[in-house]
Amino acid sequence: MSMLSRRQFVGATAVTALAPAVAAKLKFRLNYTLSSSMYGTLSLKDILPEVTKTGADTIDIWPRVHGNQREQIEEMGHDVFYKMLQSHKTAKGILRMGCITRYDLGPFGLQKEMAFAKKFGTKVIVCGGRGRRGLKGAELKTEVKKFAELMKPHLAVAKAAGVTIAIENHSSNLINTPDSLKWLAEFTPSKNLGIALAPYHLEILGVDAADHAALIKALGNRIAMFYAWQHGMGCMKKLPKEQELMQMPGRGKLDFTPILGALKQINYNGLTSIFMHPVPRGIPILPTAAQCTTEINRARAYLEKCLSANSCASTESICNAFPTPTSLSQ
């Protein structure tokens, strides 16, 4: 009669006993943040209750022209805003301001904003890069290196404030292509400089889902913000709403499954914003706050479905973590 040896039996039992614990460790989730610009210039009083409804734990505050919530904070006063945050609870505790987006200030004008972020315990500020645009090859590499050098004193301030300055790849920016992103990470080893990865702008360059996944693996933990945002039919001219909404995950043609698979593979723990730009800027993506939230949740359900499609990878990891008996004792 065939039977397992004692050693094989013990090993197999260990797999059975430990697999749930390993699976728990391997469980991956996106850390959603809600970008206030999705609600245009609606008041923070109306937006903050929507944060947890979208599965988010934090809010990303935008200024004009995309929103005006940053200006609202100055008008009401920091203490009033802090009390507003405290009045809302999430699964992780009190609602926090997870990110501030300040393209208007640029990477060299964030000193006061970093002090503001420190006051609220905010860890990420998103902005664009600076430098000549439209470069390729060696010229681009040299310009990215120059930008990295210019960032050093600003990153020292960021370190003191406990902030990561996340540079978004943008079609009207020096930091635009996959190469420019990788060089920026290479030339700036400081953990206080990160990447805000926007598929929308990469798709314009012909970067497909598989290329996105490869880029995510190359950048690894340098990604501080991931925009779940695709090009669809663009956001630069007025379109019928159904066409404009094709920027949202699950509506356009970009398959997020390999992209989320890559985020899962690197155990991404930065922020994720389900995102789009309406036309004109400064209006909600849909007429009411409730409709905006419903659309964000539709996109979130799609993203979670994409994550589920990658669940087999976790199962394989559990199996590979333990030796499997290959022979039976006679």
Image (cartoon, rainbow, N blue to C red):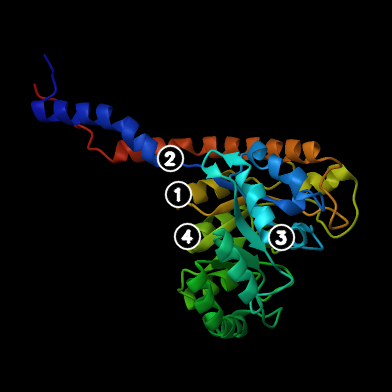
Of badges 2 and 3, the one in the foreground is 3
Residue situated in front as seen by the camera: 33 or 194: 33
Q: Quadrant of the N terminus?
A: top left
Amino acid type at image mark 1: Gln
Vertical side of 96 occupied by 176: above or below: below
Give the alpha-carbon distance from disc 4 to disc 1, as whole Å.
9 Å
Residue situated in front as seen by the camera: 294 or 267: 294
Of helix, strand and loop, which one carries label 3? loop
- Callout 1–callout 2 Cβ contact below 8 Å: yes
Residue wearing tag 2: 313
Which mark, residue 220? 4
Q: CA distance from mark 4 to mark 2?
A: 18 Å
Task: Work out whether mark 1 precedes mark 2 in sequence or the reverse, and give the earlier one.
Answer: 1
The quadrant the C terminus occupies is top left
Dot 2 amino acid type: Ala
The span from disc 1 to disc 3 (Cα, nearest Å) is 42 Å
Which residue is identified by label 1?
265
| Residue beneath disc 3 | 77
